[in-house]
Protein backbone atom coordinates (compact mmCIF):
# COMPACT_ATOMS: atom_id res chain seq x y z
CA UNK A 1 0.00 0.00 0.00
CA UNK A 2 1.48 3.32 -1.07
CA UNK A 3 1.59 5.99 1.58
CA UNK A 4 0.17 9.42 0.89
CA UNK A 5 2.81 12.10 0.48
CA UNK A 6 2.74 14.43 3.45
CA UNK A 7 1.43 17.86 2.62
CA UNK A 8 3.87 20.59 3.56
CA UNK A 9 2.60 22.75 6.41
CA UNK A 10 1.59 26.13 5.08
CA UNK A 11 2.68 29.00 7.29
CA UNK A 12 1.82 32.68 7.43
CA UNK A 13 4.15 34.86 9.50
CA UNK A 14 2.61 38.02 10.95
CA UNK A 15 4.44 40.79 12.77
CA UNK A 16 2.75 41.97 15.95
CA UNK A 17 3.74 45.02 18.01
CA UNK A 18 0.50 46.10 19.68
CA UNK A 19 -0.23 48.88 17.17
CA UNK A 20 -3.61 49.19 15.41
CA UNK A 21 -2.05 48.32 12.05
CA UNK A 22 -0.38 45.16 13.41
CA UNK A 23 -3.73 44.15 14.95
CA UNK A 24 -5.33 44.53 11.51
CA UNK A 25 -2.47 42.54 9.97
CA UNK A 26 -3.11 39.71 12.45
CA UNK A 27 -6.83 39.82 11.73
CA UNK A 28 -6.17 39.70 7.96
CA UNK A 29 -3.67 36.86 8.33
CA UNK A 30 -6.16 34.75 10.31
CA UNK A 31 -8.80 35.20 7.60
CA UNK A 32 -6.24 34.21 4.95
CA UNK A 33 -5.21 31.18 7.00
CA UNK A 34 -8.85 30.10 7.27
CA UNK A 35 -9.10 30.21 3.47
CA UNK A 36 -5.83 28.40 2.79
CA UNK A 37 -5.51 25.99 5.71
CA UNK A 38 -2.28 27.62 6.84
CA UNK A 39 -1.06 28.08 10.37
CA UNK A 40 -0.12 31.46 11.81
CA UNK A 41 3.25 32.25 13.33
CA UNK A 42 2.76 35.50 15.25
CA UNK A 43 6.11 37.18 15.86
CA UNK A 44 7.09 40.02 18.16
CA UNK A 45 10.62 41.39 18.39
CA UNK A 46 12.10 43.10 21.41
CA UNK A 47 15.43 44.58 22.38
CA UNK A 48 17.09 46.21 25.35
CA UNK A 49 16.58 49.96 25.10
CA UNK A 50 19.58 52.25 25.04
CA UNK A 51 20.04 55.72 26.45
CA UNK A 52 22.48 58.53 25.84
CA UNK A 53 25.16 58.57 28.49
CA UNK A 54 27.99 61.07 28.30
CA UNK A 55 29.65 60.59 24.94
CA UNK A 56 28.12 57.28 23.95
CA UNK A 57 24.98 55.15 23.87
CA UNK A 58 24.66 52.61 26.65
CA UNK A 59 22.11 49.99 27.67
CA UNK A 60 19.56 51.09 30.23
CA UNK A 61 20.95 50.93 33.75
CA UNK A 62 21.52 47.32 34.82
CA UNK A 63 19.94 48.02 38.21
CA UNK A 64 16.59 48.37 36.44
CA UNK A 65 15.07 44.90 36.63
CA UNK A 66 12.72 45.20 33.65
CA UNK A 67 11.69 41.99 31.92
CA UNK A 68 11.53 43.26 28.33
CA UNK A 69 11.04 39.76 26.93
CA UNK A 70 8.15 39.21 29.35
CA UNK A 71 6.55 42.50 28.36
CA UNK A 72 6.79 41.59 24.67
CA UNK A 73 5.35 38.12 25.33
CA UNK A 74 2.43 39.68 27.21
CA UNK A 75 1.72 42.14 24.37
CA UNK A 76 1.75 39.27 21.86
CA UNK A 77 -0.52 37.04 23.96
CA UNK A 78 -2.99 39.89 24.57
CA UNK A 79 -3.12 40.83 20.87
CA UNK A 80 -3.84 37.22 19.91
CA UNK A 81 -6.49 36.87 22.63
CA UNK A 82 -8.22 40.10 21.55
CA UNK A 83 -7.98 39.49 17.80
CA UNK A 84 -8.32 35.75 17.13
CA UNK A 85 -11.69 34.12 17.70
CA UNK A 86 -11.20 31.24 20.17
CA UNK A 87 -13.57 29.17 18.00
CA UNK A 88 -11.30 29.59 14.96
CA UNK A 89 -9.68 26.44 13.63
CA UNK A 90 -6.52 28.36 12.76
CA UNK A 91 -3.49 27.34 14.80
CA UNK A 92 -1.56 30.35 16.06
CA UNK A 93 1.93 29.91 17.44
CA UNK A 94 3.74 32.68 19.30
CA UNK A 95 7.36 33.64 18.80
CA UNK A 96 9.11 36.23 20.98
CA UNK A 97 12.57 37.08 19.63
CA UNK A 98 15.25 39.48 20.80
CA UNK A 99 16.60 41.62 17.99
CA UNK A 100 15.91 44.22 15.35
CA UNK A 101 12.28 43.85 14.24
CA UNK A 102 13.05 43.96 10.50
CA UNK A 103 15.75 41.29 10.76
CA UNK A 104 13.67 39.12 13.08
CA UNK A 105 10.70 39.21 10.70
CA UNK A 106 12.69 38.47 7.53
CA UNK A 107 14.48 35.61 9.31
CA UNK A 108 11.18 34.23 10.65
CA UNK A 109 9.62 34.42 7.18
CA UNK A 110 12.21 32.09 5.64
CA UNK A 111 10.25 29.18 4.16
CA UNK A 112 6.88 30.82 4.90
CA UNK A 113 4.11 31.17 2.34
CA UNK A 114 3.43 34.79 3.30
CA UNK A 115 4.64 37.59 5.56
CA UNK A 116 1.95 40.00 6.81
CA UNK A 117 2.73 43.34 8.45
CA UNK A 118 0.97 46.50 9.51
CA UNK A 119 1.90 49.62 7.57
CA UNK A 120 2.92 51.66 10.61
CA UNK A 121 3.89 50.39 14.01
CA UNK A 122 5.23 52.21 17.04
CA UNK A 123 7.93 54.82 16.68
CA UNK A 124 9.55 56.54 13.75
CA UNK A 125 8.07 59.34 11.67
CA UNK A 126 4.28 59.39 11.93
CA UNK A 127 3.83 60.89 8.46
CA UNK A 128 5.77 58.16 6.63
CA UNK A 129 3.66 55.97 4.36
CA UNK A 130 5.55 52.85 5.42
CA UNK A 131 7.44 52.29 8.60
CA UNK A 132 11.11 51.38 8.44
CA UNK A 133 10.34 47.75 9.32
CA UNK A 134 7.73 47.40 6.55
CA UNK A 135 10.05 49.10 4.08
CA UNK A 136 12.96 46.82 4.99
CA UNK A 137 10.76 43.75 4.66
CA UNK A 138 9.42 44.97 1.29
CA UNK A 139 13.01 44.90 0.02
CA UNK A 140 14.28 41.78 1.80
CA UNK A 141 11.39 39.41 2.55
CA UNK A 142 12.12 35.84 1.44
CA UNK A 143 8.45 35.27 0.57
CA UNK A 144 5.43 37.26 -0.66
CA UNK A 145 4.59 40.23 1.58
CA UNK A 146 1.24 41.84 2.42
CA UNK A 147 1.17 45.21 4.16
CA UNK A 148 -2.09 46.15 5.91
CA UNK A 149 -3.20 49.66 6.84
CA UNK A 150 -5.09 50.32 10.06
CA UNK A 151 -8.75 51.12 9.32
CA UNK A 152 -9.72 54.75 8.93
CA UNK A 153 -6.24 55.93 7.91
CA UNK A 154 -5.47 57.42 4.55
CA UNK A 155 -1.99 57.59 3.02
CA UNK A 156 0.07 60.28 4.71
CA UNK A 157 -2.25 60.54 7.74
CA UNK A 158 -0.31 60.40 10.98
CA UNK A 159 -0.55 57.34 13.23
CA UNK A 160 -1.40 59.26 16.33
Image (cartoon, grey):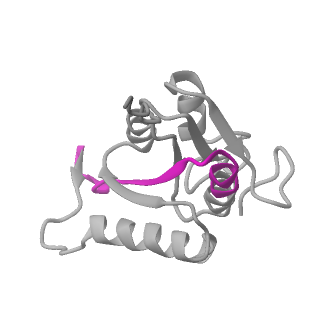
Q: Which residue is nearer to you in this view: 59 or 3?
A: 3
Q: Decide whether residue 35 is among the magenta residues.
A: yes
**Position of residue 22 in the picture relative to residue 71 (left or right):** right
Q: Quadrant of residue 109?
A: top left
| Quarter of the N terminus within the rendering | top left
Q: Which residue is nearer to you in this view: 127 or 93?
A: 93
Q: Position of residue 60 (x, y in %)?
A: 23, 61
Q: Decide whether residue 45 is among the magenta residues.
A: yes
Q: Residue at x 75, y 57 (%)?
A: 150
Q: Which residue is nearer to you in this view: 8 or 51?
A: 8
Q: Position of residue 127 (x, y in %)?
A: 73, 46
Q: Position of residue 75 (x, y in %)?
A: 45, 70
| Quarter of the C terminus within the rendering | bottom right
**Position of residue 26 in the picture relative to residue 91 (left or right):** right
Q: Quadrant of residue 20?
A: bottom right
Q: Residue at x 86, y 61 (%)?
A: 152
Q: Residue at x 53, y 69 (%)?
A: 80
Q: Residue furthest front?
A: 1
In this rendering, the answer to whether 54 lies above or below 160 is: above
Q: Position of residue 110 (x, y in %)?
A: 42, 30
The residues colored magenta run 30-56
In this rendering, the answer to whether 112 lies above or below 122 is: above
Q: Residue at x 35, y 71 (%)?
A: 71
Amino acid sequence: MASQPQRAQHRIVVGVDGSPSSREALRWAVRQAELTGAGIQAVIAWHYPVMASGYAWAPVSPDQETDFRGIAAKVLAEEIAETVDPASSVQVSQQVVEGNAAAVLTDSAAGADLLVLGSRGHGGFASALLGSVSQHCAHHAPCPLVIIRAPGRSPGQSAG
